[in-house]
């Protein structure tokens, strides 16, 4: 097992096969050079694998507790005009109707 993740599906179920890495989940194969290049161009994806861009609208798929607030973020809450976090494809920034300045994990979001 390798410490890397698949650049196509972001799963950690990868293994080396000679000079290439192979993803057991999606079958994607890549070399070390492609992985380094892919890390520089990391794509932010929602829980369904759809690419996200700055300014998109997303929907929360699970009730979430918000640190520093007594108000939970309910399933179905809409986050408009998201901002991508540089160098971190697993987090986005945004505001809900009631809570401002949120940093959310993309695994709890889907593109609207």
Image (spheres, rainbow, N blue to C red):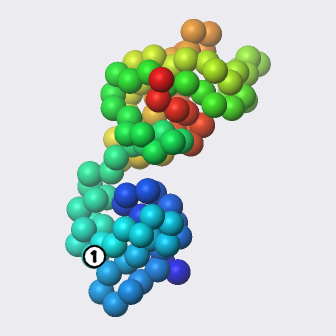
Tell me which residue sits at (49%, 72%) in the image: 24
Other-residue count near label 1 (Cα within 10 Å), few / some / many at <14 / 14–19 / ≥20 = some
34 or 23: which is nearer to us? 23
State the image quarter where residue 73 is shown: top right
Query: Is 31 drawn above or below residue 11 in the view shown?
Result: below
Tell me which residue sits at (55%, 24%) in the image: 59
Q: Hey, which residue is sitting farthest top in the picture?
A: 97
Left or right of 50, for residue 39: left
Asked if residue 6 shows in the view, the reply is yes
- Name the residue carrying label 1: 31
Tell me which residue sits at (52%, 80%) in the image: 1
Query: Is 105 drawn above or below residue 18 in the view shown?
Result: above
State the image quarter where residue 30 is shown: bottom left
Where residue 3 sits in the image (x, y, percent)? 48, 73
Tell me which residue sits at (33%, 28%) in the image: 54
Left or right of 69, for residue 98: left
Where residue 63 sits in the image (x, y, percent)? 72, 28
**Circle 1 SS class:** loop
């Amino acid at each position: 097992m390798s410490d890397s993740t698949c650049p196509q599906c972001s799963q950690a179920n990868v293994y080396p096969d000679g000079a290439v890495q192979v993803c057991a989940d999606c079958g994607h194969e890549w070399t070390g050079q492609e992985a380094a290049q892919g890390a520089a161009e990391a794509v932010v994806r929602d829980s369904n694998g759809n690419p996200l861009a700055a300014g998109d609208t997303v929907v929360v798929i699970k009730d979430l507790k918000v640190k520093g607030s007594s108000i939970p973020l309910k399933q179905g809450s809409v986050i408009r005009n998201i901002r991508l976090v540089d160098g971190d494809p697993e987090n986005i920034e945004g505001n809900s109707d009631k809570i401002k300045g949120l940093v959310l994990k993309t695994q709890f979001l889907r593109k609207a």
